[in-house]
Amino acid sequence: MTVRAHLAISGRVQGVWYRGSMQDEAERLGLAGWVRNRPDGTVEAEVEGEPRVVEELVTWARRGPRGARVTDVAVQWIEPRGQRGEFVVRG
């Protein structure tokens, strides 16, 4: 069984290597999806994989890398797309 989560991460999350760190963590966990900066200063991501492992990345997202100051992670559970094996940083 797989799940997919859409994350909207707020706080000091741009300019602190958040996207690259999330990519590293997602790849370590074997998750698929993407992460990108948004013009409003937040970071947006979609992640897909086994429920327990997706939850582990959501927990990581609430902390982020050193230098980040996460104030909120809004999680929306969406329909899985069958994506596997690649987690990319988008624009």
Image (spheres, rainbow, N blue to C red):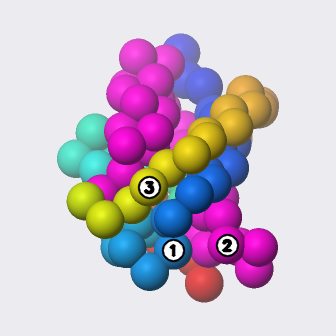
Which residue occupies 35% across, 73% down? 17
Relative depth, front residue between 33 and 19: 19
Mark toward the start of the polypeptide (1 vs 3): 1
Q: Position of residue 54 (x, y in %)?
A: 46, 30
Q: Which residue is mark 3?
A: 69
Mark toward the start of the polypeptide (1 vs 2): 1
Number of numbered discs? 3
SS at circle 3: strand
Q: Nearer the viewer, mark 2 or mark 3?
A: 3
Instruction: Tell me where residue 4 sits by quadrant.
Output: top right
Q: Position of residue 90 (x, y in %)?
A: 57, 76
Q: Amino acid at mark 1?
A: Gln
SS at circle 2: loop
Instruction: Tell me where residue 80 sits by quadrant.
Output: top right
Q: What numbered label is drawn on residue 41?
A: 2
Q: Amino acid at mark 2?
A: Gly
Relative depth, front residue between 43 and 50: 43
Specify the segment rendered in magenta: 36-65
Q: Are marks 1 and 2 in contact (CB under 8 Å)?
A: yes
Separation of residues labelled 2 and 3 (CA atoms): 12 Å
Relative depth, front residue between 83 and 60: 60
Which residue occupies 49% across, 19% down? 51
Q: Amino acid at mark 3?
A: Arg
Separation of residues labelled 1 and 2 (CA atoms): 6 Å
Q: Determine crowd level at label 3: few under 14, some 14-19, many 20+ residues with C-alpha closer than 10 A.
A: some
Q: Position of residue 91 (x, y in %)?
A: 60, 84
SS at circle 1: loop
In this rendering, position of residue 63 left or right of residue 3: left
Q: Which residue is mark 1?
A: 14
